[in-house]
Image (tube, grey):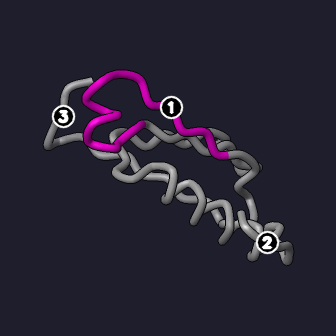
Amino acid sequence: MAPNPFRFHMSSADLVQIQDITVGRDGVWESMFDFADSQCQTAGEDQHFSFRDVPNPRHIGAVVERESLEAKGRRLAPGQ
């Protein structure tokens, strides 16, 4: 979908609602410049969130996962 200055949609979810994070990187440019698309599955009403062209996607995914687990009162194993 082409960008449109007259169209805007936004949704949000609590960190405790995040169930799964997926990062998909395909292609040379994404690999060279370290960006990818990310998807979050949630337990909320809008169950799927997509983020396009996320910079440093592994780090961002790890931060979201860590914060989500902490919000749920859990922690990752050491070294993750």
Name the residue tied to disc 1. 24
Spatial separation of the CA atoms under disc 1 and disc 2: 25 Å
Q: Give the range drawn in magenta.
A: 21-36
Q: Give x and y (percent) for residue 43.
A: 76, 49
Q: Does the magenta stretch include residue 1?
A: no
Spatial separation of the CA atoms under disc 3 and disc 1: 22 Å
Name the residue tied to disc 2. 78
Label 3 or label 2, whichever lies nearer to me, is 2
Name the residue tied to disc 3. 3
Q: How crowded is mark 2: few (under 14 residues within 10 Å), some or many (20 or more)?
A: few
Upstream in sequence: badge 1 or badge 2: 1
Q: Nearer the viewer, residue 20 or 55?
A: 55
Q: Relative to residue 27, is residue 63 depicted above or below?
A: below
Q: How many labels does the image show?
A: 3
Spatial separation of the CA atoms under disc 3 and disc 2: 42 Å
Residue lying furthest front: 79
The amino acid at mark 1 is Gly
Upstream in sequence: badge 3 or badge 2: 3
Q: Which residue corresponds to the image point at 70% horizontal and 66% vertical from the top-left?
A: 68
Q: Residues within 10 Å of mark 1 (few under 14, many from 20)?
A: some
Q: Give x and y (percent) for residue 80.
A: 71, 63
Q: Which of 19 and 6 is in front in this view?
A: 19
The amino acid at mark 3 is Pro
